[in-house]
């Protein structure tokens, strides 16, 4: 396993992962634009 720094090209995939995580928790609502800015 290799661990590398994320790049701007990784942001869509990272947002997809956050969407999966937020779907598991009723207290969170995914907001793609905010996630992209935050990442």
Image (spheres, rainbow, N blue to C red):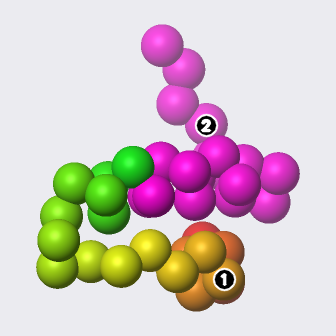
Secondary structure beneath disc 1? helix
Percent x, y of residue 8: 80, 60
Q: Which residues are magenta?
A: 1-19
Q: Position of residue 21 (x, y in %)?
A: 32, 54
- Residue in the image at 27% along x and 77% along y: 28
Question: Residue 20, position in %: x, y?
Answer: 39, 49
Residue 18 visible to an observer of this rendering:
yes
**Residue depicted at 52% across the width and 80% down the height:** 31
Q: Which mark is residue 20?
A: none
5 in magenta: yes
Q: Tell me if residue 29 comes above or below residue 20 in the rendering.
A: below
Structural crowding at the residue carrying mark 2, measured as other residues with C-alpha within 10 Å and reported as few (<14), some (14–19) or many (≥20): few
Quadrant of res 18: bottom left
Residue topped by disc 1: 33
> How dense is the environment of label 1, judged by Cα within 10 Å: few (below 14), some, or many (20 and up)?
few
Name the residue beneath numbered marker 2.
4
Q: Provide the major secondary structure of the magenta segment.
A: helix
Q: If the image is split into quadrants, where does the C terminus sit? A: bottom right
The numbered mark, 1 or 2, whose residue comes first in the sequence reads 2
Say if residue 38 shows up in the picture. Answer: no
Number of numbered discs overlaid on the protein picture: 2
Q: What residue is shown at x 44% (from left), y 74% (from top)?
A: 30
From this view, report whether residue 30 is shown above or below residue 5.
below
Left or right of 29: which side holds 8?
right
Q: Viewed as shown, does residue 19 lie left or right of 14?
A: left
The picture places residue 25, in percent across and down from the top left corner, at 18, 64
Q: Nearer the viewer, residue 34 or 29?
A: 29
Point out the residue furthest to the top here: 1
């Amino acid at each position: 396993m290799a661990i590398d720094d994320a790049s701007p090209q990784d942001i869509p995939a990272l947002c997809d992962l956050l969407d999966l995580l937020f779907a598991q928790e009723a207290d969170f609502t995914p907001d793609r634009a905010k996630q992209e800015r935050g990442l």
